[in-house]
Image (cartoon, rainbow, N blue to C red):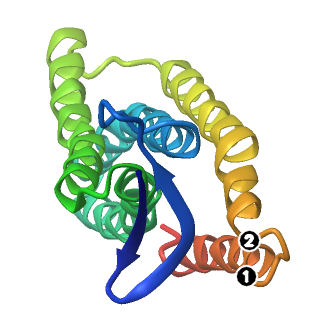
Amino acid sequence: DVVQVDLEGLQSQQEVTSNPDGEVVEDAKQLRNVGMMTALAIAIHNLPEGLATYVGYLTDPSIGITMAFAIAIHNIPEGLCVALPIYYATGSRLRGFMFALLSGAAEPLGALLGFALLTVTGNNLHGAVYGVVFALIAGMMVMICILELIPTAYRYDPEDKVSTASLVGGMAVMALSLCLFKV
């Protein structure tokens, strides 16, 4: 059984194959795994973002609001990195949306964690804790990008018509957002 995946009238070059039991095999499984690993990494990455936004807001409300706005902008491509592989693997927009939503829901949980930590420690959370948490999450995100996202992009664009330009464009957008929202 072979099914063509179609997104808003654009034909995907990727075919999703299922066995007689209706189970998705091979490439679809790999895409689903990329989406799920990315969702997990982004959810873990979003916890300290929520924490940082909360603590930033406590320090100075304008810092917290600026951070929340900058984080909201970069959450759009994060959500796409989760939703699109799952959508193409399963054909379900709802499933892709739900995984993206769940990975993003970790941010408010991070803010609640910050509230709990600051309540328990009496506003005495050591800066090294932030450094360790942020560095661990950054390392995880870099490895997901290097081992999963970039190779998947090139697998679906073997002639490199848009992958490298998109990679550089994404870096430029992030650099620009860091410059525009420098606090």
Q: Three-letter amino acid code at disc 2?
A: Asp
- Residue at disc 2, secondary structure: loop
Query: Residue 12 at what x, y percent from top left?
Result: 51, 75
Q: Residue at x 67, y 42 (%)?
A: 148
- 180 and 37: which is toward the camera: 37
Q: Residue at x 49, y 45 (%)?
A: 28
- 45 and 125: which is toward the camera: 45
Q: Is residue 18 above or below residue 88?
A: above
- Residue at disc 1, secondary structure: loop
Badge 1: residue crowd in 10 Å (few <14, some 14–19, many ≥20): few
Q: Quadrant of residue 64?
A: bottom left
**Mark 2 / mark 1, whichever is N-terminal:** 2
Disc on res. 162: 1
**Real-space Cα distance between discs 2 and 1?**
7 Å
Q: Three-letter amino acid code at disc 1?
A: Val
Q: Residue at x 19, y 48 (%)?
A: 98
Residue extending farthest to the right is 159
In the image: residue 97, left or right of residue 76:
left
Query: Residue 21 at what x, y percent from top left?
Result: 30, 30
Q: Quadrant of residue 54?
A: top left
In the image: residue 181, left or right of residue 143:
left
- Count numbered badges in the picture: 2
Nearer to us: label 2 or label 1: 2
Badge 2: residue crowd in 10 Å (few <14, some 14–19, many ≥20): some
Query: Residue 182 at what x, y percent from top left?
Result: 53, 71
- The residue at which mark 2 appears reads as 157
Q: Are marks 2 and 1 in contact (CB under 8 Å)?
A: yes
- 61 and 12: which is toward the camera: 12
Disc on res. 68: none
Residue extending farthest to the top is 120
In the image: residue 131, left or right of residue 22:
right
